[in-house]
Image (spheres, helix red, strand yellow):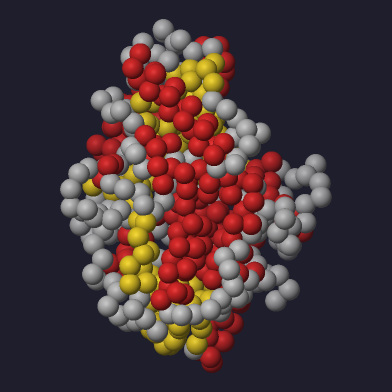
């Protein structure tokens, strides 16, 4: 195949056939979220043969339900988790300047100084932002990538967040953090870069009977099974880790977001950051996002019981988010303004005590009695570090030699330094396309074989027909859900999903 990054049904079938003929690899990774794809890329770029399987799709689970933030770790510094805070700042810098500068950009975070905010709270935020500046500098990230924090006047605050409450507004504190154009897009980019280095990416393939050297795989599309042997088996299934290794006990925490039209917030250019009443170090964020939307989040609630494929927000969480954001708005929002909602489960390590918001966001690597290595916990920002740590431990335990980790300086597909980048001029390309595909944007249009490739998939949705086709031919989309809910995020608003469904089905049925 000329484009080694291209994932599609044809490549999937060929990879499954080749795996059935051989049946032996160095590393099997179970789980196609950000951690699993990160491990696959790390292993493949070290020269190992790798297979990654997921019984659903890339970014099917928690990896698509985040706040789309690449945190610098400020919250963890405030709670004394200096190690996580520093690593987060370092990993944020790596993503913004080396791995994925096309997908991660500086996002202004604005804390309005309203009468309800005490002097002590203001001082705490100011000290926190100053500490965040120090973390950024310590991590080696320049102020040209992430500007320094500062105080701004009321007029500028209103210009950046037009619906903020104006009565008594005494300006705002402004800081910057990393923002992903989309978390599922990052997972897809990592997976395609892993494929570029030889990984077999197999979605709709489930894993069972995993041991330290073999896994029983089932093609969910055909029902066919095969046993693959490996020198290392890694479980990166997040909140489902206990289904692979029954000895693992997690305490899932549900994080819920609401989706609004950006117009409901006056088309803001900054994330409105509102302290949660009664909390010292927790905030609610109203973040401007792609597709003309604002995401409002997030909650941190215990989620006991069976793990659902798609978690659902609770009415209490919806009310909590609305009540909190309304403390900072001139005109209150209601459930009638909510266009969509989503919830994700954090795979937190169970310590048996405390609130989930107080549990560590650190990760752990566990070897089961059967010899399977599982990685649990952690946070999206640190996925690259988690992958390196997991693989280093597994390779050492199996005395398996490989090259050194290369991912600190490895540009993902779409980054200007990646070999598939073709961007020379952006004068005729939509800004939304550039934001999602970076230097690969011309490939999306040039590779299209459909009619009217630059037309929108539906009125008012700034996704082109070429992007839907590219999802099928290059990004491994096998269903309309893959296209609408993960390769694009159109599906977060059900009304938009319905309007774009016919176009998605068109490209799945076409012979391209």
Which quarter of the rendered picture does the C terminus lie within? bottom right
Is residue 2 positioned above or below 465 on the image? Answer: below
Which quarter of the rendered picture does the N terminus lie within? bottom right
Horizontal side, residue 28 vs residue 248: left or right: right
Is residue 267 positioned above or below 502 on the image? Answer: above
Between 233 and 63, the one nearer to me in the picture: 233
In the figure, residue 123 lies in which quadrant? top left
Count of numbered labels shown in the rendering:
0
Horizontal side, residue 390 vs residue 139: left or right: left
Which residue reaches farthest top? 168
x, y (%) of residue 4?
A: 67, 71
* Residue for point 20% across, 44% down: 354
Is residue 14 positioned above or below 8 on the image? Answer: below
x, y (%) of residue 245?
A: 29, 72
Horizontal side, residue 84 vs residue 109: left or right: left
Is residue 378 positioned above or below 479 on the image? Answer: above
């Amino acid at each position: 195949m000329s484009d080694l990054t291209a994932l599609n049904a044809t490549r999937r079938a060929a990879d499954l056939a080749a795996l059935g003929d051989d049946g032996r690899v160095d590393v099997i990774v179970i789980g196609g979220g950000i951690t699993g794809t990160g491990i696959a890329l790390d292993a493949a770029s070290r020269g190992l043969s790798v297979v990654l399987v997921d019984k659903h799709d890339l970014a099917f689970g928690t990896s698509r339900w985040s706040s789309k933030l690449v945190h610098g770790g400020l919250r963890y510094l405030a709670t004394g988790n200096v190690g996580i805070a520093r690593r987060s700042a370092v990993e944020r810098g790596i993503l913004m300047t080396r791995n994925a500068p096309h997908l991660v950009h500086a996002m202004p975070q604005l804390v309005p100084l309203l009468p309800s905010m005490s002097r002590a709270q203001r001082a705490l935020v100011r000290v926190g932002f100053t500490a965040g500046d120090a973390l950024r500098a310590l991590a080696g990230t320049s102020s040209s990538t992430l500007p320094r924090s500062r105080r701004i006047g009321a007029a500028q605050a209103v210009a950046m967040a037009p619906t903020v409450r104006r009565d008594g507004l005494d300006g705002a504190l402004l800081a910057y953090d990393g923002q992903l154009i989309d978390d599922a897009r990052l997972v897809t980019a990592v997976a395609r870069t892993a494929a570029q280095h030889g990984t077999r990416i197999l979605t709709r393939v489930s894993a069972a009977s995993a041991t330290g050297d073999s896994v029983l795989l089932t093609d969910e599309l055909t029902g066919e099974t095969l046993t693959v042997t490996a020198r290392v088996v890694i479980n990166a299934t997040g909140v489902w880790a206990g289904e692979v290794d029954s000895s693992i006990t997690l305490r899932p925490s549900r994080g819920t977001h609401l989706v609004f039209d950006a117009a409901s917030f006056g088309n803001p250019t900054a994330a409105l950051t509102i302290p949660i009443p009664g909390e010292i170090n927790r905030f609610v964020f109203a973040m401007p996002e792609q597709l003309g939307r604002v995401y409002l989040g997030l909650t941190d609630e215990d989620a006991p019981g069976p793990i659902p494929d798609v978690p659902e927000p609770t009415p209490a969480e919806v009310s909590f988010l609305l009540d909190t954001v309304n403390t900072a708005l001139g005109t209150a929002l209601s459930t009638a303004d909510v266009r969509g909602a989503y919830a994700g489960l954090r795979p937190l390590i169970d310590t048996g005590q405390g609130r989930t918001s107080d549990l560590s966001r650190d990760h752990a690597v566990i070897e089961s009695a059967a010899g399977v290595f599982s990685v649990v916990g952690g946070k999206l920002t640190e996925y690259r570090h988690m992958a390196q740590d997991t693989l280093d431990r597994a390779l050492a335990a199996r005395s398996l030699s490989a090259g050194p980790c290369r991912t600190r300086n490895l540009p993902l597909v779409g980054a200007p330094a990646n070999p598939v980048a073709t961007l020379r001029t952006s004068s005729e390309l939509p800004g939304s396309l550039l934001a999602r595909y970076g230097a690969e944007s011309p490939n999306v249009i040039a590779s299209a074989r459909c009619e009217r490739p630059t037309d929108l998939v539906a009125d008012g949705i700034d996704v082109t027909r070429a992007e839907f086709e590219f999802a099928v031919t290059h990004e491994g989309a096998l269903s309309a859900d893959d296209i609408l809910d993960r390769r694009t995020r159109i599906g977060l608003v059900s009304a938009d999903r319905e309007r774009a469904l016919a176009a998605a089905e068109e490209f799945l049925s076409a012979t391209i």
